[in-house]
Image (cartoon, rainbow, N blue to C red):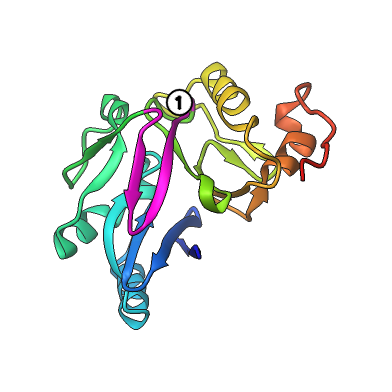
Amino acid sequence: MLNIRAFVFGRLRENTYVLSSLPGRGVVIDPGCETSEELDFLLKWLEEHELKPEAVVLTHAHHDHRAGAGALQRMFGIPVYMGEAEKQVFDDLDFETSPLEDGQSLTLAGITFEVIATPGHTPGGVCLYDRADGALLSGDTLFRGTIGRTDLPGGDYDKLIVSVMDKIMGLDGDVEIFPGHGPASSIAEERTENPFLQPFNEPWENES
């Protein structure tokens, strides 16, 4: 059974996720610990729940999503996975990276993610799809009721819309979305109600 624990860190209230499905093993998605206090809070929670992270995975490399990645890599000796194209924009990383590629299957801590390349918010942004558990880690590609901003270096609105419509909206409606900021949502909700996807919105047909 998949367990997802969300933490809200930093000035931008970024969502950091710890996922686990096997005793003692976990994976950290987008550790946005910007202060030592936030990092200590995360480490204490991991210790209390007897979880050792096997890897860090970044949906993209904006600072609010990677602030704690270097510290976790050094403390636990674990890889940090990131889309290779992120290096086009971000040259100040304090950690070594392992590349993510579109369509890649990545199994960590007993959880298998399908890597979905979703450029637009950043050049190498990805979403992580756990098909078995119906969960999508969308980073800053897609939020509840909105989409990622594209006015920062490396952003491209046209690419973002194509990423969302071609890569994400075709998933099953009951897939739960865990975004990089704000509350969770679902594919059905965003498909039918997200105003930023108009005029693409379609009525939701129950797929069960």
Q: Is 7 above or below relative to 121?
A: below
User: 13 or 200: nearer the eye?
Assistant: 200
> Splitting the image into 4 quarters, where does residue 68 fall?
bottom left
- Tell me residue 98's x, y (percent): 22, 39
- Tell me residue 129's x, y (percent): 49, 43
Seen at 58% across and 38% down, the residue is 142
Q: Quadrant of the C terminus?
A: top right
Seen at 30% across and 27% down, the residue is 89
Q: Is residue 116 magenta?
A: yes
Seen at 69% across and 47% down, the residue is 174
Q: Is 119 above or below relative to 43?
A: above
Which segment did they paint magenta?
102-120
Left or right, 78 with respect to 86, comes to left
- Tell me residue 157's x, y (percent): 55, 21
Q: What secondary structure is marked by label 1?
A: loop
Q: Is residue 89 magenta?
A: no
